[in-house]
Amino acid sequence: MKKVSLIRKLTTMIVTLCVFTAFVFADGETTEVYLTGTSNSSAGDFVVQTTSDMFHYNGREYEVFRVYYDDPAMNMKIAVNNEGQCTSFVAFNGEFMFFYNCNKHGFGVRKVMFSNPWAKDVFDPQQFHDQTVLLKEKKVDKKKAVGLIAAYVPQLKG
């Protein structure tokens, strides 16, 4: 009798743990490490992970990567859209959106949007200008571009 009760309790605990784990990870959380690197700033090293999240902007759908830095205040997401002649990228968090794309001069940052006026106060316009061409190539591999963005975005935040 005690043996059956113990097995039933153990089975119930295992099933409960499995269900709880499924709910925790069912919200589009990260799945695997996509790449790692070092930022060119005090944000430190970073890890980029894939997600099942989607980002929608101007009628387009973007796949989303999460970027985690040594300094958690710098954590952000990078959205990637493969449509068109050049893959477009959006680096964003609750304060900013930086748009990266290719043009005849190469790959770099093209546009910035802030969530509020005071978010501009920590923005470095000289870094924005310096990052308009990160790579003098018109076509950039997605992994390389995500790595460049993760490495350079923290510098834009003065």
Image: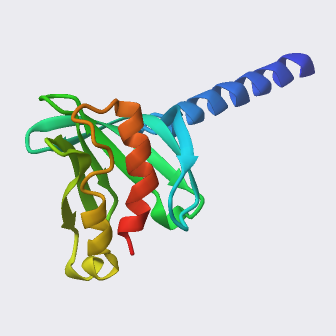
Q: Identify whether 105 is placed above or below 14.
A: below
Is 50 positioned to the left or the right of 33 in the image?
Answer: left
Q: Residue furthest right?
A: 2
Front residue (pair 48, 150):
150
Is 108 positioned to the left or the right of 15 in the image?
Answer: left
Q: Quadrant of residue 152?
A: bottom left
Tell how many labels.
0
User: Which quarter of the rendered picture does the C terminus lie within?
Assistant: bottom left
Is 130 positioned to the left or the right of 117 in the image?
Answer: right
Q: Residue at x 58, y 60 (%)?
A: 44
Q: Is residue 95 visible?
A: no
Q: Identify whether 15 is placed above or below 152.
A: above
Residue 65 location, x and y as percent? 40, 40
Q: Residue at x 34, y 39 (%)?
A: 64
Q: Is residue 135 visible?
A: yes
Front residue (pair 22, 108):
108
Instruction: Name the colour scheme.
Output: rainbow
Is 134 positioned to the left or the right of 88 in the image?
Answer: right
Q: Residue at x 46, y 49 (%)?
A: 67
Residue 8 location, x and y as percent? 76, 21
Front residue (pair 59, 153):
153
Residue 157 location, x and y as percent? 38, 70
Q: Identify whether 37 is placed above or below 93.
A: above
User: Which quarter of the rendered picture does the N terminus lie within?
Assistant: top right
Q: Residue at x 36, y 39 (%)?
A: 145
Residue 90 location, x and y as percent? 26, 48
